[in-house]
Image (cartoon, rainbow, N blue to C red):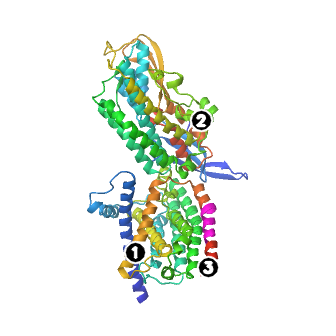
């Protein structure tokens, strides 16, 4: 019973974290993109437009939940949750503070790279069940992309696991030493790029390519179900950045309690902002170029990193 | 013409088995169709096997409407042809009327036409380059391009009160002289414009993703470009050195020193680069024209309100941002034209789409379409 209560508490907390992360993430993205494009971004609602996304969310929640006639109804309604849930679950193994992780499991890193990839099924289903050619193509592209970027991402995380001698994110964070960052810089780059691709964000937003597929796999969604897709994207963004900060950059190590949380937050914010800068500066890849990048560039890079770590390890 | 719009389309696979193709209907309302173009794309996986443009969604019957308008009433209607570069249709029409009625245009008016049309060329190319960016997913490029375009549109607003449909070039001259300090405004802006354009060049064309997306896409051979009647940057991107300003020169263009950028590969990248370099050349022409322009009348005297040219016909063409824009007029001696035919470069260039898009992926279809830079007001008329 306590397990159930604890699970419910974690679930609610996780949902809240993702909701807040999405609200903040959308606002931050609009501000960053506005700065790049010589605009102001949201300014009217709240200080510096901070509550603009809250207002947008209220609008989305109040909208009619439309299910188009031609769709496969159960699959169509289920797909957003299938995308969202695995990403929300992945938050549970991220060490948010110096000595604390919501779920301290010895296979946390494996959990983190494995569980979010289940959301591929949701993307595929959303595209397939919409009965719309754009959505179908978007779903297929999404599946191809997310699956191929699993490999370099996993390999880059594996390098850190080897170095730390543990698969528990908390252990990796606690054993972090400053020279790990230069030594595993290639892994960080591979992790960064493949995380963007895994999240379907620009320049890898091929499944939802606005100029070709209108909105890709969620072209037929509206209201709260569309918002859930957006929340998954920003939830995934936050999860990937915090995990990257914890594993590759030492996370909250060295500072106790709240200060540690602030430290890991600052590191994650750097990664989030970098991802946004990349998105708003670069054009989009084509699907075949994207797969070429995954298999011919990132995977060999990750393997080189593994070799480097393998050479370093005996000297430790 | 019968349209091949089937729900299901079957082809034969490489091993002889029947394969069902996916028919993707792109448009007429779609983020990257540059207006209201509809393309019926047959795709095998992601690869387009057949792309069929369907036009006519913006057909307003302009060529018929003008048969019931007087010669001066037609000028604002020509604005609605190419609404991204309204000055060109104004000018092409006025040149045909002037040829038909034997009107001599004062020199100052010719200079003003050159200045406005070269500014218009930059504005139009900014739209094209910006949407090339947007098509490839670089939204920032679009904003930067529109920053430059916005300044030109503001200059036009100062000049004639209108931001999009100018009605500025009139038979016999232009509608009004420039406001005070207008030339100085332009001269103080040209350097900033050069900087912005080269910044866009570095931002977008310097990016390896953009190059990878544009190079080798929609390759048009010089032979096909000539054979299909392509003109403007589409033909020049393929290495066809054909610019009416140089090779069938008109107005006061022979007095200016400018180059015609010509590509070599005929792909989307070369077409976009031609447009980019043409912007620099246009700035050069504008600067020279402002230097050479002298005070004088901006409008020919003695043009009646109800212009009734002698029976006959006239054709004249100018180099618009999209290519050779020609207008053919037939007069039966009445104050209204008997017939007007627009030779629209966007229409001829768009005809290349099935040829260029075949074999590329769906993502490249929108790039090919964007690289042809169609404006549907002019395609459908």
The image shows residue A272 at horizontal and vertical percentages of: 43, 65
CA gap between label 3 and label 2 equals: 56 Å
In primary-sequence order, the first of circles 1 and 3 is: 1
Q: Which mark is residue A263?
A: 1
CA gap between label 1 and label 3 equals: 28 Å
CA gap between label 1 and label 2 equals: 55 Å
Figure label count: 3
The image shows residue A228 at horizontal and vertical percentages of: 41, 66
What range of the chain is rendered magenta? Answer: A294-305
Q: Is residue A88 left or right of residue A49?
A: right
Does residue B93 sit above or below A191 in this rendering?
Answer: above
Q: Disc 2 designates what residue?
A: B238
Q: Residues within 10 Å of mark 3 (few under 14, many from 20)?
A: few
> Is label 2 in a helix, a strand or a loop?
loop
Q: Chain of mark 2?
A: B
Tag 3 and tag 2 share a subunit: no
Residue B265 in magenta? Answer: no
The image shows residue A248 at horizontal and vertical percentages of: 50, 73
Which image quadrant is residue B381 in? top left
Identify the main secondary structure in magenta. Answer: helix
> Is label 1 in a helix, a strand or a loop?
helix
Q: Disc 3 designates what residue?
A: A313
Tag 1 and tag 3 share a subunit: yes
């Amino acid at each position: 019973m306590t397990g159930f209560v604890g699970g419910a508490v974690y679930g609610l907390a996780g949902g809240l974290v993702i909701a807040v992360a999405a609200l903040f993430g959308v606002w931050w993205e609009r501000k960053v993109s506005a700065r790049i494009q010589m605009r102001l971004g949201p300014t009217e609602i709240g200080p510096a437009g901070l509550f603009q996304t809250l207002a947008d969310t209220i609008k989305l929640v109040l909208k009619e939940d439309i299910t188009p006639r031609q769709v496969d109804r159960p699959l169509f309604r289920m797909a957003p949750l299938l995308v969202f849930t695995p990403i929300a679950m992945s938050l549970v193994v991220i060490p948010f503070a110096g000595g604390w992780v919501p779920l301290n499991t010895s296979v946390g890193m494996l959990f983190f790279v494995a569980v979010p990839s289940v959301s591929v099924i949701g993307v595929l289903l959303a595209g397939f069940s919409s009965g719309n050619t754009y959505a179908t193509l978007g779903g297929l592209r999404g599946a191809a992309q997310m699956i191929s970027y699993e490999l370099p991402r996993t390999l880059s995380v594996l390098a850190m696991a080897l170095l730390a001698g543990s698969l528990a994110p908390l252990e990796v964070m606690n054993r972090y030493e400053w020279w790990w960052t230069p030594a595993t810089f290639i892994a960080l780059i591979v992790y960064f790029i493949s995380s963007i691709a895994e999240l379907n964000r620009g320049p890898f937003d091929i499944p939802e390519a606005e100029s070709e597929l209108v909105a890709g796999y969620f072209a037929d969604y509206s209201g709260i179900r569309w918002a859930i897709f957006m929340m998954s994207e920003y939830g995934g963004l936050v999860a990937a950045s915090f995990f990257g900060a914890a594993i590759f950059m030492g996370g909250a190590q060295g500072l106790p309690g709240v200060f540690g949380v602030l430290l890991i937050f600052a590191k994650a914010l750097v990664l989030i902002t970098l991802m946004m800068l990349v998105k708003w500066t670069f054009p989009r890849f084509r699907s075949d170029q994207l797969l070429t990048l995954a298999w011919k560039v990132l995977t060999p890079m990750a393997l080189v990193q593994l070799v480097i770590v393998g050479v370093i390890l005996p000297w430790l | 013409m019968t349209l091949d719009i089937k729900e299901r389309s079957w082809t034969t696979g490489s091993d002889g088995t029947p394969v069902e193709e996916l028919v993707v209907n792109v448009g007429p309302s779609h983020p990257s169709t540059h207006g209201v173009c509809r393309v019926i794309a047959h795709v095998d996986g992601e690869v387009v096997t057949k792309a069929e443009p369907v036009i006519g969604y913006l057909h307003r019957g302009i060529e018929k409407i003008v048969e019931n308008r007087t010669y001066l009433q037609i000028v604002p209607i020509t604005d609605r042809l190419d609404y991204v570069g309204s000055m060109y249709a104004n000018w092409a029409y006025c040149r045909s009327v002037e040829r038909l009625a034997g009107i001599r245009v004062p020199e100052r008016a010719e200079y003003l036409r050159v200045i406005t049309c070269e500014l218009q060329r930059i504005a139009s190319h900014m739209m094209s380059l910006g949407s090339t960016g947007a098509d490839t997913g670089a939204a920032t490029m679009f904003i930067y391009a529109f920053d430059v375009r916005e300044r030109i549109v503001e200059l036009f607003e100062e000049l004639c009160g209108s931001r999009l449909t100018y009605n500025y070039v009139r038979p016999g001259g232009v509608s009004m002289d420039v406001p005070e300090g207008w030339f100085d405004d332009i001269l103080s802006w040209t350097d900033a414009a050069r900087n912005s354009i080269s910044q866009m060049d570095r931002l977008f064309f310097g990016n390896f993703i953009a190059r990878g997306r544009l190079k080798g896409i929609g390759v048009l051979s010089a032979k096909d470009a000539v054979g299909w009647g392509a003109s403007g940057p589409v033909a020049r991107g393929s290495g066809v050195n054909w610019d009416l300003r140089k090779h069938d020169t008109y107005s006061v263009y022979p007095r200016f020193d400018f180059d015609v950028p010509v590509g070599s590969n005929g792909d989307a990248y070369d077409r976009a680069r031609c447009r980019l370099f043409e912007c620099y050349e246009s700035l050069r022409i504008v600067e020279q024209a402002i230097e050479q322009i002298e005070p004088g009348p901006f409008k020919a005297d003695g043009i009646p309100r109800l212009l009734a040219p002698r029976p006959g016909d006239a054709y004249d063409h100018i180099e618009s941002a999209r290519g050779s824009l020609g207008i053919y007029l037939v007069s039966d001696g009445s104050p209204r034209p008997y017939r007007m035919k627009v030779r629209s470069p966007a229409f001829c260039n768009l005809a290349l789409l099935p040829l260029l898009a075949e074999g590329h992926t769906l993502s490249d279809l929108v790039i090919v379409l964007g690289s042809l830079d169609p404006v549907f007001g002019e395609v459908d008329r």
